[in-house]
Amino acid sequence: MSETSRQQLPETAAPSVILDVRDLTATYGRVEVLHSVSFHVNEGEVLVVLGPNGAGKSTLLRALMAQVQRTGSIRFQGEPVEKRATDQLAGAGLIMVPEGRGILGPLSVRDNLDLGSYMRRDGRGAINADLDNVFTLFPRLKERQSQRAGSLSGGEQQMLAIGRAILGNPKLLLLDEPSLGLAPRVMDEILQSLEMLKNRGLTILLVEQKAPLALKIASRAYVLRSGHIAIEANAVDLASEEALAKLYLGAHDHG
């Protein structure tokens, strides 16, 4: 490379923050589960939230989606959104795949996918393009379009839940325990699909009980303990710390 070419290379830009959370507190009735939690998600990254059983990981996602009582500051794409309702957040591109998947079993696979796009206003062409992307990502869903969603295997239901979320055109995809109840081989397939989505530029916030799997595709990780952020680290660094894994990441983590 010539000296002139070197001079023309731009400096590496600082990552753009897509989600900035400050002093987030969440309660169930009188029980406070999250205590002034602050963190951020950079655009284009996979961020994983880990922690022991009962740490408040799933509550964190529910709080972001206005599904539990909460206080604090939440800025999404630079805009304050803490006063928005769940459907308004989804319409803005903050979309969650819940623990348990939340698919509608009596409906067909295609009907479930179509429900994901019901709030979109960008035209049938864009929706069809995303549907094609889902079928490329998960060919089994294309094969089973007319099949009742409730008759799918657990792994296929998780693929359907992710596919439905993609049809919502997410700017930030929240995933709550996608490995729950899945065989390791199936979860590997799900994680490969998430890595493909990351490579396409989708930002992902992943709450996951199986730390070694999640850390393979994450760039950064937060460890949540007793409703507080205990650790922030690069995923590679955290994965190499066996003591941390034993202390924070129990094999039966469903918090």
Image (cartoon, rainbow, N blue to C red):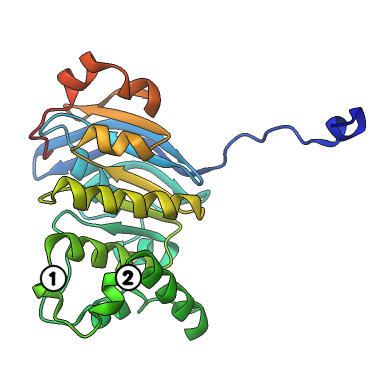
Front label number (2 vs 1):
2
Q: Amino acid at mark 2?
A: Pro
Q: Position of residue 98 (x, y in %)?
A: 21, 56
Q: Secondary structure at mark 2?
A: helix
Q: Secondary structure at mark 1?
A: loop
Q: Earlier in the sequence, mark 2 or mark 1?
A: 2
Q: Position of residue 199 (x, y in %)?
A: 49, 50
218 to the left or right of 178: right
Decide: marks 2, 1 in contact (CB < 8 A)?
no
Res. 214 image quadrant: top left
Tell me, yes or no, if residue 168 can be seen here.
no
Q: Determine which of the numbered discs, if any, sits on residue 1 in the image.
A: none
User: Residue at position x 19%, y 44% from top?
Assistant: 58
User: Residue at position x 87%, y 35% from top?
Assistant: 5
| Front residue of 132 and 32 | 132
Please state, as top left, top right, bottom left or bottom right, where the N terminus lies in the image: top right
Q: Position of residue 211 (x, y in %)?
A: 24, 33
Q: Position of residue 159 (x, y in %)?
A: 25, 63
148 to the left or right of 113: left
Label 2 Cα crowd, 10 Å radius (few <14 / some 14-19 / many 20+): few
Tell me, yes or no, if residue 238 can be seen here.
yes
Label 1 Cα crowd, 10 Å radius (few <14 / some 14-19 / many 20+): some
For disc 2, the marked residue is 139
Q: Amino acid at mark 1?
A: Leu
For disc 1, the marked residue is 152
> Relative to 158, is 228 above or below?
above
Please state, as top left, top right, bottom left or bottom right, where the C terminus lies in the image: top left
Res. 157 image quadrant: bottom left
User: Residue at position x 20%, y 49% from top?
Assistant: 185
How many angstroms separate mark 2 from mark 1 (CA)? 14 Å
User: Residue at position x 29%, y 57% from top?
Assistant: 96
> Relative to 155, is 217 above or below?
above
